[in-house]
Image (cartoon, rainbow, N blue to C red):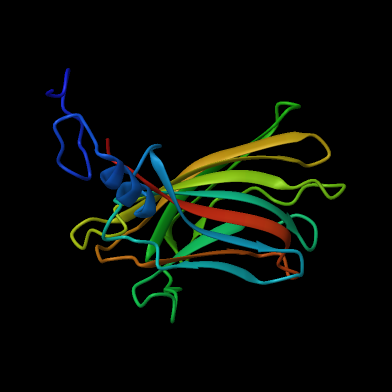
Amino acid sequence: MSYLGTQVNNVKQNSGLYTPSEILQLTKDGSWGGSLELINTISFSSVTSTIDFTNIKESVYDVHLIQLTAILNGSGGSFYVRTSQDNGSSFDDTIGDYEFSSQRNWSDGSNFEGRSNGGSAMEIFGNSGNGGQPTNRYIYIYNAGNSSKYTSITSQSINWDAKLKSSFGGGVRDNAHIVNAIRLFTNVGGGFQSTTAKIYGVKQI
């Protein structure tokens, strides 16, 4: 029996029917079902200054998704993203290597825009809020494993800051190289606490 309809972009060539052994192997490889593969989860309740994702399978996925629920150990502040070319041994903090543009919007109608064409990181806004309420955020990362394209991000978050606040924006590492690790950090002196962060590879179907 042949496949009916448009042939999907399978990770394993197939005419439309999978044997039980093929299903078991694809499940083991993380390639059976769904459009996301969970690569890593980082969770902690004590204070830490950074969240580093290494071994992100940049040679497998050209799009990654980070989901973050975090409370900062302090008030105010922003989140930032840096990239690494050496699997997280170091992260580029050179001024001028990043550009970003982001906007914050509050439920009372106020707003604020931040941008830079010569930063040492990509700012993505969204602080811890008040009353111990977390920031909930997602970040898409594009072209990390492509040595001829700039690695770029888009991001959106929501949190409580005495009133509802949302933020959105994007950034880019403005020279081309392979990125194989991602760092999240904050300018709040106490860093992160009570945090769960997950990184996924987005499957091409």
What's the residue at 78%, 42% (across, down)?
161
x, y percentage for residue 128? 74, 51
Q: Position of residue 136 (x, y in %)?
A: 65, 44
Quadrant in the picture for residue 144? bottom left
Vertical position of residue 4 compared to residue 37: above or below: above
Instruction: State the quadrant of the N terminus.
Output: top left
Question: How far across and down, in percent of the image, does residue 111 sit?
Answer: 65, 35
- Front one among 17 and 74: 17
Q: Residue at x 80, y 62 (%)?
A: 74
Residue 72 in view here: yes
Residue extending furthest toward the front? 20
Classify 109 as above or below 128. above
* Image coordinates for residue 138, horizontal then vertical, percent: 54, 44
- In the image, farthest residue toward the bottom: 89
For this rendering, which residue is in front, 59 or 70? 59
Q: Residue furthest right?
A: 131
Image position of 17 (left or right of 186): left
Q: In the visual, does 39 lie left or right of 190?
A: left
Q: Quadrant of residue 163?
A: top right
- In which quadrant will I find the C terminus? top left
> What's the residue at 65%, 55% (across, down)?
196
Taking the image as shown, residue 93 lies to the left or right of residue 26, namely right
